[in-house]
Image: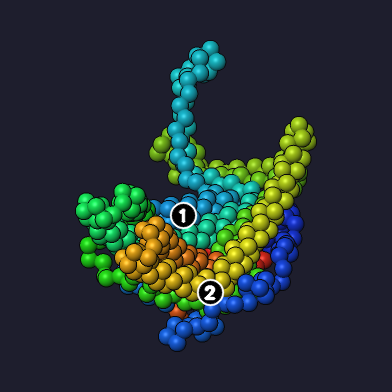
Amino acid sequence: MQKHSLIAVAVAFMAAGCTMAPKYERPEAPVSDAFPQGGVYATQPVASAERTANGQAATDIGWRDFFVDPRLQRLIEIAQKNNRDLRVSVLNMQAARAQYQITRAGLMPSLNAAGSENKTRTPSNLSLPGQEVSNQYSVGVNASWEIDFFGRIQSLKDQALAQYLATAQARKAAEIALVSSVADQYLTVLAYDDLLKVTQDTQKAAQDSYNITKLQFDTGSGSELDLRQAETVVAQASANLQSQARLRAQAENALVLLVGEPLPADLPAGLPLSSQNLLTDIPAGLPSDLLTRRPDIMEAEQQLRAANANIGAARAAFFPKISLTGNFGTLSPSLGGLFKAGSAAWGFAPQITLPIFNGGVNIANLDLANVQKNIQIAQYEKAIQTAFREVADGLAARGTYDQQITSLDRNRFAQQRRLDLSNLRYTNGVDSYLSVLTAQTDLYSAQQTLITARLQRLTNLVDLYQYLGGGWIERAGDEPRPADAPVDYSTTSVPVAASAVVTASQGSGATAGGLAP
């Protein structure tokens, strides 16, 4: 009767899911309640007539809605299937899921079937005549179970679950970052295309000027100074052309690495840099929204939950461990008598282990667990601060790039006009060739600066979309996948990730297999 009462109490205790872990409380966000306003933040761009976010948060805007370039959309699609970093993040998630299942199994009794034969020989002076050799055969079932009175295994299970959820969020963050990285690299390639075009045009114009100056020098109507000045522009443009061609090739190689395979020959036609009509009016929301929109912040919080649960396991180590072992089967001196009447055998061995002295290991483990939790708190707060800074920087850039580009475009136009007038004055003998050379160099610099600013504006919009949590869904209106959603690599040999079926929660209601997006 006492044995049955003990088991009943143990089952009730385990069903309650009691642990000695401290109650989890989310730390306060160490940032302002709102993003900076005024100054550079006050001039955010408005929606164009054709393209607007309609007030939707970045998490609700699919990447196919954010990007309009069909070539870029196809590259992102390929990268999501082939990028090796993303594949590693999925495999890490699978490994954490398996580790969670291993830890969770510790809550359950283990049951094994066993069969054995034991043959022994006893010296004749210690045994009866003819009985020197004896046999014993057994078949039965062995069972063992550690009763988790103080929640040690439950705490370890909660820790493993939190780590699994953290790797799932890390996978989600990796996929969102991949979308942004592919877009940034694609835009960089387009910018080099524009730079090459400007350099080629500059080189052609400089070569034409050089030919004219060379003819004037050969006929004695021009000076060698003018000739050498014209030659410097040609040489500089030629050198820049080779440099930009090299950088363009390297940028495409970086894009291939992100995509995970050579760029297919059947990619749809793309759009030039000037036609990348990205959404410019995605609202920033509040900093507190980032806690549920940024997977890197959610990953850091799950790591904090894991550290919190580890304290429970460290505390439980100070208390007794109670385990039950038993077996039931049959014993017989002969193989044929195993299942005859009267051959049944059983054993029951409850055990309690109480730590008395271990050199301070348990105390040190508890101290370590508390320190590790404090580390995770700091890392969680740093993740929030980093996210706040990234969004604030993105908003500051978004509020200034349009006006900067407008000014740079006016400068480019003025430099072009200046070059035309300088050429006219030089042709009419009013001015020296130095004014033409200077105007041509300044125009070339203005054109390059304008292209660079256009690229920076676009990559800032892409990065801000990522910083606000966008890039997880494909199209607006799609149901967001759980962070540990299955992955299908189609023809690849990588195993398909399967969502864990988890019944335990960690206070926030998030469970594996159904994570909040």
Q: Would you say 312 lies left or right of 495 here?
A: right
375 or 79: nearer the viewer: 79
**Which residue is label 2 attached to?**
403
Picture quadrant of residue 263: bottom left
The outermost residue toward the bottom is 49
- The x, y position of residue 208, in whole percent, is 25, 60
Expressed as whole percent of the image width and height from the top left, the position of residue 193 reads: 33, 62
Q: Viewer-proximal residue, 16 or 253?
A: 253
Q: Which mark is residue 36?
A: none
Looking at the image, tell me whether mark 1 or mark 2 is earlier in sequence order: 1
**Residue where numbered disc 1 is placed:** 89
* Residue 161 seen: no
Which x, y percent locates residue 154? 65, 55
Q: Nearer the viewer, residue 345 or 179?
A: 179
- Residue under the image location 66 percent in, 56 percent down: 382
Quarter holding residue 64 = bottom left
Discs 1/2, front = 2
Label 2 neighbour load within 10 Å: few <14, some 14-19, many 20+: few
The amino acid sitting under disc 1 is Ser
306 horizontally vs 83: left or right: right
Relative to 6, 250 lies left or right: left
Q: CA distance from mark 1 to mark 2?
A: 40 Å
